[in-house]
Image: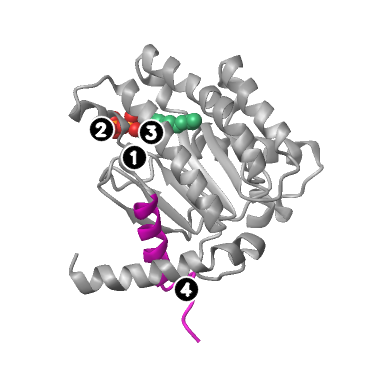
Amino acid sequence: MKLFEVVLLSFSLSGLLFRQRKNKQDNKDAHLPRHVAIIMDGNGRWAARRRLPRTAGHYAGMTALRRIVRCASELGIAVLTVYAFSTENWTRPKEEVDFLMKLPQEFLEVDLPELKRNNVRVKLSGNPGGLPSHTREAVETAVAETANNTGMVLNFALNYGGRDEIVRAVRKIAAAVAEGTVKPEEIDEEFFNKFLYTADLPDPDLLIRCSGEIRLSNFLLWQLAYAELWFTDVYWPDFNKQHFMAAIEAYRKRDRRFGGVRP
Ligand code: FPP
C-alpha cells in the first residue's frame, strides 16, 4: 500500500470511528453494513505454519472471535454471524470435532458477562439437535440470558449448512401445504424466508472470508444473494480490528444496485 493510500484510509477510518457512538445508538449510517457474516477460515493452516496441532489454531481462532465481536459491537454493527461449525465439519477427526464442540462453552463461560454488559443478544443458527448436550446447553443458556438485549446480535452458525437449512424449510412448507394450511400461491420469497434460521434477521450486507479461499462453502446460500463479498489471505487467528475496518471501508465504497440501475 502506498503512503498516500495509508493516509487516506486512516482519515476515512477515523471518521468512521468518530461516528461509533452515534451508530451505537441508532445504527442508521447507510454506509455501515447492518449485518456482517464471517467465514472464519485458516485456523488449521495457521497452526501448521507454527508446527502446532490444528486445535491450537481453533483456540487462537476463538481469541480472534473475541476481538472481532468487541469491535463489531463497538462500531454499531446490528448483526454479526460467524460460521463456527458446518454440517460438513462432522467428517473431521473426532479429536478435532470434540475440541471444536467445547469452544462455544469455553467462549461463553468467559465472555457471557461482557456480552450482557454490552447489550449483545446471542443467537444460534443451525440444528441444535445434532450438537452434544454440553455445547447445546451453553449456547441455549446464552440465548436465554441475552434474549431481551437490544444491541448487536451475535449469531453463531453452528451445525449449520445452507442446503440443509433450505431443505428443512421446504419440508416444513410442504407439510403445511399437504395439511391444507398453506396454499402454494402464498409461497413467495418473504414467506420462504420465515422458515429459515435467520427469519428474524436482515440479510447480510457484507461477507468476509479469511485464508485466501474464494468460495461460500454452503454458508447462508439464500441470505447472501445480494451481499458484498470481501476476501483476504489473512488466516482467521491473525484477523484483527484493522482487517475488519479495511473490510468495512471496502464495503462503504461499493455501489449496491440490487439488480437495478442508479437513478
Ligand atoms: C475453519 O478453519 C474453521 C472452523 C471449521 C472452525 C471455526 C471455529 C473457530 C474460529 C472458533 C470459534 C469459537 C467459538 C466460540 C464458536 P479450518 O480448520 O478449515 O482451517 P484450514 O482450512 O486452514 O484447515
- Residue at disc 3, secondary structure: helix
Q: In this view of the protein, which residue sits in the foreground, 116 or 145?
A: 116
At label 4, the amino acid type is Arg
Q: Which residue is mark 4?
A: 257
Based on the displayed image, in which of its 4 quarters is residue 189 positioned?
bottom right
Q: Nearer the viewer, residue 60 or 234?
A: 60
Q: Quadrant of the N terminus?
A: bottom left
On screen, residue 40 versus residue 152, left or right, reads: left
Q: How many marks?
A: 4
Question: Which one is in front in this view, the residue at disc 4 or the one at disc 2?
Answer: 2
Is 128 located above or below residue 66 in the figure? above
The kind of residue on which mark 1 rests is Trp
Q: Earlier in the sequence, mark 4 or mark 2?
A: 2
Q: What type is the residue that disc 2 sits on?
A: Trp
Mark 2: C-beta under 8 Å from nearest atom of ligand 1: yes
Q: CA distance from mark 1 to mark 4?
A: 30 Å
- Which label sits on residue 236? 1
- Quadrant containing ligand 1: top left
For the record, the magenta segment spans 241-263
Q: Is mark 1 within 8 Å of ligand 1?
A: yes
Alpha carbon distance from label 4 to label 3: 34 Å
The answer to which of marks 2 and 1 sits earlier in the sequence is 2
**Mark 3: few/some/many CA within 10 Å (<14, 14-19, 20+):** many
User: Residue at horizontal 61%, vertical 66%?
Assistant: 22
2 and 1 marks in contact (CB < 8 Å): yes
Q: Earlier in the sequence, mark 2 or mark 3?
A: 2
Residue marked by disc 2: 46
